[in-house]
Amino acid sequence: MAAPPEEELRSALASVLLQDGDDAQGVVDGIDGDIVDYLAGMLHDSGLEDVEDSIGPFLEGYGCDEDLVKACGDAVLKCNNGGGDDGDGNGGHVTNGNGDDGAPQGAVKLKQGIVSMSSALTDQSEAEIDATRYMWGQDNKIAAMTNQARDAHDSTVSAKDKRKARKELEAARREYEAKMALLEAEEEGDAGKASVSNMVIPDYRSGRNEKDIHVRNVSLSLDNGTPLLDDGELKFAHRRRYGLVGKNGVGKTTLLKAIAAFEVEGMPRHHRILHVRQEIRAAGGDISVLQAVMDADVERNTLIEEEKQLLQRLEGEGPTGDGGPSGASVKAKLDKLKAKSKEEADGADDSFNADLKRLDEVYERLQVLGSDTAESRASTILSGLQFTPSMQSGPTSALSGGWRMRVALAAALFIEPDLLMLDEPTNHLDLEAVLWLESYLQSYRHTLIVVSHDRSFLNEVCTDTIEFAKRKLTYYKGDYDTYVRTSEENVKNLMRVYQAYQDKRAHMMEFITRFRAAANRAKQVQSRVKAVEKMDLEAPEPVVVEQLWRFAIPNPEPLGRPIIAIDDVSFDYAAVDEATGAKKPKEDWILQSVNFGVDLDSRIGILGPNGAGKSTLLNLIMDKLTPNRGSISRNGNLRIGHFTQHSADKFDLQLSAVENMLNSFDQSDDQAMRSFLGRFQIQNTDALKPMMMLSGGQKSRVAFASLAYQKPHVIIMDEPTNHLDMESIDALVEAVKDFRGGLIVVSHDQHFITNTCGELWAVGGGKVTRFRGDFNEYKKETLERTAKQVADSVKSLSAINN
């Protein structure tokens, strides 16, 4: 069967594949006039044997279904039948190129096919080469369209559902942007105020002054109605310290906010309750850090103001001072007023006695709050959190966001509420401050709830653990490790119970199936049928064990030494005063005469307080800074991967994960990048939606993917565990342990350091020295050093104030 002219083939295909003959608009995305031209030419050259088999795979690659392929085949055959018959009713022979009556069509086509293939291989025109590259998606511009067509072909979602999903995504984007705008407006309104969450003043007249908290039937949901907690139970015993654990997004922070605002129905209102948020963005004010901490105690400030007003009414005196009255002055003042009341008993009115009674109550409450020791307590807490005397006397507006978070934490510890709730308190602390906070909270005199990703911190601080999962609160005795062991044992027990039920049911069903038709066993069969029905009604829930998520960092190829060599490096940001040209003494430089090296088997933990020069050292290693003295040698083929607590923030949240990764690695193609992200559980629509719609854990996984895609020889990590949940931290620990390259870590997470680092280097006083001991020995030394610094700081500040 000879092929009709190419123009007729094109018209036949266009009638099926193009809308109203428009070359630019196909019935399927990706099909246009150029594609139709290519298919017509291919059919004209190869003949019309098995049309559907010839063009079917190509059209299916663009998402065409079987009906559309068949319609194309029918149109082509109809075109051939209409114009290809020679009129003699035979149609079984063709004329060869010389006009003679030729051989049967099959032989001619075979010869023609061989000639056509040889020609295509040896002598292709530029248009044919472009068409071939187009067909196989080798052109970068076409690859995106090809992937889109593949998605359309593979997807089982209807076009209507896709439009609905796009509308929902756009609505969610607008809601996200509105929330961010509202948050920014709230933070701007907080500018100049104390950098700590406000505490609701308790009502001491309510309740029976019980110290335990027990609230039943607690339900919690988001503003959009999404339920977080169903019929939960809050049980907080006095002087117990609870660790609240659960996946990111389960509602831990929302629960703490609701408790602090007394939005939980039935919450006793005679307790002082305070919640310290994860992030504080307020700019701070001009008051000193020390004063900001003391001003945070709203109840103390209210009582001092009330004392001032009462004294003015009673004897016309002013306040006793911002710190509140001392014990001796309180007694003397009250004795004087009571004596005055007796002398003027006849003329004293009821208001005088009422004010005197209220003043006695105010002084009694101020004594309970420790008002007379407020300044020394505040200074002690600030010193433990690594505030120097000059920082304590300086304005809060001069502090960075991380240090303002420390002010918020210090204020909460100073207030010492009946129920203190700390939300990720270690995120902005260095290791020295974390260790001091651990020690301080271990002796906390009231009830404490902590949300933290630092399991070592939870183990040191907590006496109990609360699991928030599946909209329920489950209570466990013991620290975090005890909770993990108990939880795993509970799962094993449930699995054994469920397996025993399955085995017993299978055994009874085997009997029923075997003897169902036996008349002499009918009674036994019926009895077992009823027993199985009863078992099914009381059957235990099947146990679903969540699979642990893990990822891998590709191992690099070997490199010759030295990988990184640091030789006698000294550095300071202001080694020379720009105004005067005076040189700064070398003993005051941030880093002085640093010497050490990094190999592919190095596992180095960098320890030291904030400001000691840890991040500066990392920037020198990564060639972001140039040393003032000495040299740093790096292998010419070295690839360094850098992962920080802000790695997820470097992405453009308006773009998808795939787009962000392609922007970072422009040599990659779309499909390969999507497959790579799939290893990190960023799949399907999650890989294509704007990253602002992803959860915090998902953003971290994209950051992990970015790190792994670099295939680094050496990984440098700066506080990598901040903002990660336990599952992600465990996955990161396992990936780093399996990585066969160099590692340098700066972290306050004790669990991460002890599980990934083989040697410790301490930074401080301008020196970088290897610590000859394990982490527990370093921890002991640090606690002793911090205790001495706190005592010296309190004395120094007292001398300044005096």
Image (tube, grey):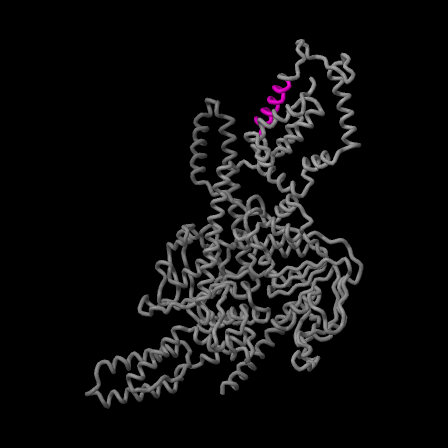
Residue 720 percent coordinates (x, y):
61, 61
Q: Reply yes or no: does residue 768 show up in magenta.
A: no
Residue occupying the far left of the picture: 346
Boundaries of the magenta span: 65-80
Above or below: residue 274 compared with residue 492: below
Is residue 760 in view? no
In the picture provided, is 465 more to the left or to the right than 52? Answer: left
Q: Nearer the viewer, residue 541 or 349?
A: 349
In the picture, residue 755 is in which quadrant?
A: bottom right
Residue 303 percent coordinates (x, y):
36, 77
In the picture provided, is 281 more to the left or to the right than 598? Answer: left
- Residue at (49% x, 54% y) in the render: 249
Q: Reply yes or no: does residue 67 show up in magenta.
A: yes
Q: Nearer the viewer, residue 55 or 80?
A: 80
Above or below: residue 451 compared with residue 665: below
Residue 445 percent coordinates (x, y):
45, 71
In the picture, residue 642 is in which quadrant?
A: bottom right
Is residue 609 in view? yes
